[in-house]
Image (cartoon, rainbow, N blue to C red):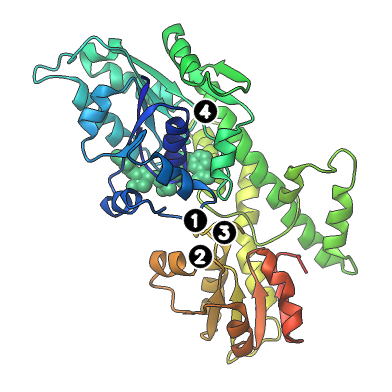
Amino acid sequence: MITVTVFGLGFVGLTTALGFADMGYKVYGVDIDAGRKDTLRKGELPFSEPHMRDVLREQLGKNFTVTDDPASAVRESEYIFYCVGTPYSEDGSADLRYLFSAIDSTVDALVNEYGDPIDGNIRLMITKSTIPPSTTSDKIVPYVASKGKISKNIGIANNPEFLREGHCWDDFMNADRIIVGCDDDRTKDMMDVLYRPMNVPKFFVSHNTGEFIKYLSNTILATLISYSNEMATIADTIGGIDIPKAFNILHMDKRWNGCAMTSYVYPGCGYGGYCLPKDTNAMLAQSKNRGFEPQILKEVIATNENRPRMMANMISNGLDKNNRIGILGLSFKPGSDDVRDTPALKIIKELQKKGYEKISAYDPVANKEFSLRYPEIKITIRDNMKELYDESDVMVIVTAWNEFRMIREYGNKRVIDCRYML
Ligand SMILES: NC(=O)c1ccc[n+]([C@@H]2O[C@H](COP(=O)([O-])OP(=O)(O)OC[C@H]3O[C@@H](n4cnc5c(N)ncnc54)[C@H](O)[C@@H]3O)[C@@H](O)[C@H]2O)c1
């Protein structure tokens, strides 16, 4: 039976682990977060994600094990996946310390006290985390080679993941395509066997190409969002323009019509979440390091960073410092409780900087996650929209949750719609 170890049990790693378990493989999940492992062993998810809890409960004790013994898991596996975080460093580049720590655990498990391989088995080390182009060829391959004879028994690949939070299970199981960055036939053949149950196009490309495709994908999305926000600002500056109507009519062009991508061509509070901000910054940093300073990406980032300030200016326009502000939405997008790099945080901070102290907020799923992740942000969290409405002087829609569309039914208080959704 094919055996897989997955390092990192976040959105990507847990989905990958359960996906392979669902295909009938034996899967070990490894994480450094003991609380997360306990939660998973109880059959609970550490985040909100449709359908995944049912799959977790079905696979726990069947094909999926959350282990505290990564060394044994690695020894038993032919496929070792890295799905750990790759956050920003201070200069915007990707911080690879979690990835290399997991690679170290793998190599340590596969050599004996003399540094020789424990067996002659061939294993693959596969990075699913998003890593800047050339990381595999310039950093991972030489690093593993520096570990001596064991490197001959290891194939190295990257296998970028394109799932969207809120749709993790469906996007993994019904992927549009599988991309494998690998530079040798042995690795290619083993990856082909692994993904055989998935009947989708598979592309075997060079290490750098595999990594680059992921950044192409995320930077185009960031660019579409910043473009839309800049166009909305232009429209505001000119005046007399119905912004939502203009964008909705744009989407009716038959070259766009019906395409899910239109959701990225619409103004809002700027992109947030774990991926677009860090990946756009990492691509810029990587290119600058190699001697080319991209102008479009620089402006995409600048426009995005400026957006929450513009929203805060719009909210504070004519508003007394004693007024109570009710923020609707804390997660970075509807359908998710992820609050990493969420525009709500930036807008709240801008308002507090301006001297607004009476800020309350409500989110259908992210209240707890926001309070846990940002305990330093002093706002009042409310359990429902009505309670927030009753105590606020002005309401601000920050995340485009569908239920916020009914806000007008509560009365005629001022509503600032930063998502152009009403
Ligand atoms: N979230 C997404 O929508 C998405 C989509 C595609 C790609 N990605 C990329 O996938 C990677 C993971 O993203 P995520 O959102 O799943 O992150 P996450 O923060 O939800 O999960 C990462 C997990 O890795 C664990 N971890 C860190 N170091 C470890 C180690 N040495 N050994 C074992 N576990 C370790 C952490 O405790 C955490 O549970 C990132 O590179 C991200 O850019 C994310």
How far is disc 4 from disc 3 in space, using C-alphas?
Answer: 25 Å
Mark 4 near mark 3, Cβ–Cβ under 8 Å? no
Residue tagged 1: 48
Q: Nearer the viewer, residue 40 or 126?
A: 40
Mark 1 near mark 3, Cβ–Cβ under 8 Å? no
How far is disc 3 from disc 2 in space, using C-alphas?
Answer: 9 Å
Quarter in which the N terminus is drawn: top left
How far is disc 4 from disc 2 in space, using C-alphas?
Answer: 31 Å
Q: Disc 2 or 1, which lies upstream in sequence?
A: 1
Residue 366 marker: 2
**Residue type highlighted by circle 2:** Ala
- Where residue 22 appears, x then y in whole percent? 46, 33
- Residue 160 versus residue 120 in the image, above or below: below
- Where residue 144 appears, x then y in whole percent? 29, 20
Residue at x 78%, y 60% (from the top left corner)? 232
How far is disc 2 from disc 1 in space, using C-alphas?
Answer: 9 Å
Q: Which of 237 and 342 is in front in this view?
A: 342
Q: Disc 4 or 3, which lies upstream in sequence?
A: 4
Q: Disc 3 or 2, which lies upstream in sequence?
A: 3
